């Protein structure tokens, strides 16, 4: 892989991994606070899955860069600054109410499901193998959150109002989440990653009719232009301060 393609591949992997890590952290904040005990357990498991997915992508980064796969992911998580993260802003937003959390998770899971379905055909075998394994878990995640979105949208007048508010709050951030990373077209040309339009069209065909027809929600008409993934909200620094505090106090510790 030449140097320019390697740079594009790194940016792509960072985007995948950082999205999963930060969303997994946000989901973990519901542990002990979900509406019912059953959901407390289910959503905690989803949080663990997301963080596990992040670890898998970071491990591929370690392989690509010739680093120790047992140590390098921790370096990437605990000793990078906010400016170096490539997650989309939507995953770093505070959880809000249960409607917002479920809708954000559904929108992300639906995007991840369609992207992984394409990535499992990657010419780079480590990516194809990881994508195939993750896809089985994402199918469960998407089905779980989809049911919650439907349940709240078609529940009471209040639950529907909250879901509509959640949609209006999430929608401005979707362009950044769905936008192709820098150099993705070159990766697609090399068979490493799919063209963005391949999985984006599948996401739209799945998500938009579900939200409008089945849930009875009104889609916002305007989506702001996609921001670069190096642009973050102040919330990311708060997450990282919490996540990184102990490792930075004891950088040589063995856990």
Image (cartoon, helix red, strand yellow):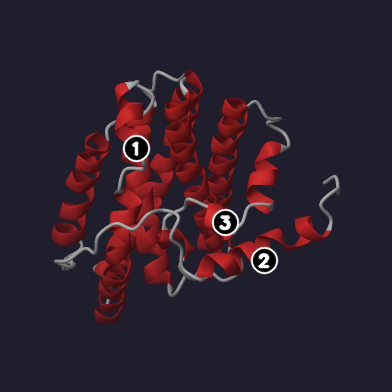
Badge 1 density bin: few <14, some 14–19, many ≥20, Cα 10 Å: many
Mark in front: 1 vs 3: 1
Residue farthest to the front? Answer: 3
For the point 34% across and 21% down, which residue is it?
Answer: 191
Residue 68 as seen in the image, left or right of residue 165: right
Q: Are marks 2 and 3 in contact (CB under 8 Å)?
A: no
Q: List x then y, in percent, for residue 101.
A: 42, 65
Q: Are marks 1 and 2 in contact (CB under 8 Å)?
A: no
From the viewer's perspective, is residue 171 above or below residue 114?
below
Comes first in the chain, label 1 or label 3: 3
Q: List x then y, in percent, for residue 156.
A: 27, 77
Q: Which residue is mark 2?
A: 242
Closer-to-camera residue (79/50): 79
Q: Is residue 42 visible?
A: no
For the point 56% across and 51% down, which residue is it?
Answer: 45
For residue 115, the mark is: 1
Mark 2–mark 3 Cα distance, whole angstroms, equals 18 Å
Q: List x then y, in percent, for residue 137.
A: 46, 39
Mark in front: 1 vs 2: 2
For residue 44, the mark is: 3
For the point 46% across and 40% down, which residue is it?
Answer: 11
For the point 86% across and 49% down, which residue is it?
Answer: 253
SS label for mark 2: helix
């Amino acid at each position: 892989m030449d140097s320019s393609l390697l740079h594009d591949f790194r940016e792509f992997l960072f985007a995948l991994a950082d999205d999963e890590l930060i969303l997994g952290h946000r989901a973990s904040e519901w542990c002990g606070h979900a509406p019912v005990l059953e959901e407390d357990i289910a959503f905690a498991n989803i949080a663990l899955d997301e963080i596990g997915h992040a670890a898998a992508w970071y491990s591929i980064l370690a392989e690509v860069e010739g680093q120790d796969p047992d140590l390098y992911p921790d370096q990437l998580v605990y000793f990078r600054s906010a400016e170096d993260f490539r997650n989309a802003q939507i995953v770093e937003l505070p959880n809000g109410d249960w409607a917002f959390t479920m809708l954000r998770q559904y929108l992300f899971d639906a995007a991840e499901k369609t992207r992984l379905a394409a990535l499992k055909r990657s010419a780079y075998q480590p990516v194809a193998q990881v994508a195939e394994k993750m896809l089985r878990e994402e199918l469960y995640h998407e089905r779980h959150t989809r049911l919650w979105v439907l349940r709240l949208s078609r529940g009471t007048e209040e639950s529907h109002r909250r879901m509509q508010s959640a949609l209006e709050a999430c929608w401005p951030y979707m362009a950044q989440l769905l936008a192709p990373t820098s150099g993705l077209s070159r990766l697609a040309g090399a068979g490493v990653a799919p063209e963005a339009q391949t999985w984006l069209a599948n996401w739209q065909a799945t998500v938009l009719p579900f939200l409008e027809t089945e849930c009875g929600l009104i889609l916002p008409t305007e989506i702001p232009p996609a921001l670069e993934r190096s642009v973050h909200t102040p919330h990311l620094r708060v997450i990282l301060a919490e996540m990184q505090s102990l490792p930075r106090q004891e950088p040589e510790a063995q856990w």
